[in-house]
Image: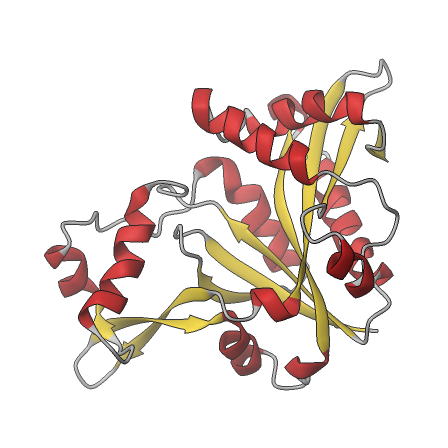
């Protein structure tokens, strides 16, 4: 069993088709493959200088092969300038102990990271990277392949020469990548000129959204467990309702 970074563009589609087919089908799978093929890069280190020059060439791909050179696992990692990422909105949930109910709001990822990582100066972050997607052949799960891929993700964060790097992953939810998350997000901006905390249950009812809106996709449990294992902190939910886990690396 060995893992290699894909460098030959001819191998890209095969690896992406393997990874993406665990999460998507038909048009959504083709969109997944197309977008990552367009953003594929084979640079060893992606830093702030590189991203300023090539912001759209920001995806690394890793593939796992067995001893017979069969593809049995893979991972995509995406790199971003923190300056562009930090103002994206994510959902956060709090609990009102007086009213005994959950409240939900949206905040910039910058504010969430500041709140969760008080030992770091968020202004020092220059580059962020995302464990975008990874998959392991079903019959080989539980043998440490996913763990090794996650370790490579962390190694990629540690390679970046800038002072601080923010690494994160969005664990796909049951309703990831469909319009439910967008509907939910738009409601906050339509109903409130200033974003406020809204009662979660009442808001779901008003929008006729399912109560299990935050349930993790069954194919993403591995990412969730590894995020906990490697001490990533739970930050909230992304626009498409996947759980967001993050860690700040100080170099």
Farthest left residue? 206
Quadrant the C terminus occupies: bottom right
Residue at point 51%, 49% (across, down): 171
- Left or right, 189 with respect to 233, comes to left
- Left or right, 71 with respect to 115, comes to right
Report x, y in % for residue 181.
33, 51
Q: Quadrant of residue 84?
A: bottom right
Q: Quadrant of residue 169?
A: bottom right
Question: Up-down: is 126 above or below 119?
Answer: above
Report x, y in % for residue 141.
65, 31
Residue at point 12%, 56% (across, down): 205
How are the colours assigned in the image?
secondary structure
Residue at point 86%, 53% (across, down): 45
Count numbered badges in the picture.
Answer: 0
Quadrant the N terminus occupies: top right
Report x, y in % for residue 34.
59, 29
Report x, y in % for residue 215.
36, 48
Decide if residue 137 is in sight here: no
Judging depth in this view, the residue of 55 and 221 nearest the camera is 55
Decide if residue 185 is in sight here: yes
Farthest top residue? 68
Q: Quadrant of residue 6?
A: top right
Question: Up-down: is 9 above or below 237?
Answer: above
Question: Up-down: is 50 above or below 57?
Answer: below
């Amino acid at each position: 069993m060995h893992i290699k970074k894909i460098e030959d563009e001819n191998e890209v589609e095969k690896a992406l088709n393997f990874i993406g087919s665990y999460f998507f089908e038909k048009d959504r799978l083709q969109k997944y493959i197309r977008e990552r093929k367009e953003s594929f890069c084979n640079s060893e280190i992606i830093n702030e200088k590189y991203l300023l020059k090539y912001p759209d060439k920001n995806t690394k791909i890793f593939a796992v092969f067995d001893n017979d050179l069969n593809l049995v696992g893979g991972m995509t990692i995406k790199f971003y300038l923190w300056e562009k990422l930090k103002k994206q909105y994510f959902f956060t949930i709090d609990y009102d102990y007086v009213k005994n109910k959950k409240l939900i709001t949206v905040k910039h990822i910058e504010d969430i990271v500041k709140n969760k990582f008080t030992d770091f100066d968020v202004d020092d972050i220059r580059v962020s990277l995302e464990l975008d997607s990874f998959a392991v052949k079903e019959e080989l799960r539980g043998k440490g392949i996913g763990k090794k891929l996650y370790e490579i993700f962390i190694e990629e964060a540690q390679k970046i020469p800038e002072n601080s790097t923010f690494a994160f992953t969005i664990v796909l939810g049951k309703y990831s990548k469909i319009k439910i998350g967008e509907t939910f997000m738009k409601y906050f901006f339509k109903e409130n000129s200033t974003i406020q905390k809204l009662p979660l249950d009442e808001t779901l009812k008003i929008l006729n959204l399912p109560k299990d809106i935050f349930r993790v996709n069954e194919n993403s449990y591995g990412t969730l467990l590894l995020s906990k294992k490697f001490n990533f902190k739970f930050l909230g939910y992304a626009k498409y309702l996947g759980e967001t886990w993050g860690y700040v690396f100080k170099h």
